[in-house]
Amino acid sequence: MFSLSRRCLPTAVQVRRFAATPYVSNTDATSTQGEQHIRTKLTEKFSPTTLRVQDISGGCGDFYAITIASEAFKGLPMIKQHRLVTETLKKEIEGIHGLQIQTRVE
């Protein structure tokens, strides 16, 4: 009889959650450089009332979640709102693996 051993997986996983209340911030002491860069570009382009940029890849800069609300999206369908954001971040998107975008009009 033989025993199968299981590979031990790390038990501590860093999880970053969205804040319950929206905010707009150009600098945040806990933000990564990538988050700050994206936040700056989006703020300059859209003057958002709500902007949240989070590196949800654990800090390596491979996957970002963006929540943005701006009057610039007024009257546009969601796909065009997202297209405006991706066009603004075209250069940054080339170096990442994933991007999650949520847009709203406020």
Image: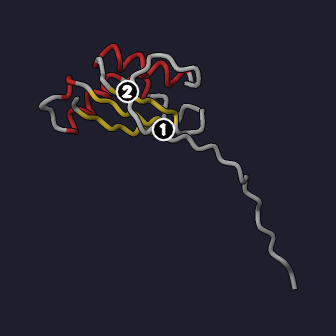
Who comes first in sequence, dot 1 or dot 2? 2
- Callout 1, which amino acid? His
The image position of residue 58, as x and y in percent, is: 60, 38
The image position of residue 21, as x and y in percent, is: 40, 35
Which residue is painted at 16% across and 37% down in the image? 77
The image position of residue 55, as x and y in percent, is: 52, 33
Q: Residue furthest left?
A: 75
Where is 44 relative to 50, above or below? above
Q: Residue furthest bottom?
A: 1
Which residue is painted at 86% across and 81% down in the image? 2
Where is 43 relative to 7, above or below? above
Q: Residue furthest right?
A: 1
Q: Which residue is mark 2?
A: 51
Q: Which residue is mark 1?
A: 97
Left/right of residue 88 with respect to residue 56 in the rendered view: left
Quadrant where the C terminus lies? Answer: top left
Q: Nearer the viewer, mark 1 or mark 2?
A: 2
Q: Residue furthest top?
A: 44
SS under mark 2: strand
SS under mark 1: loop
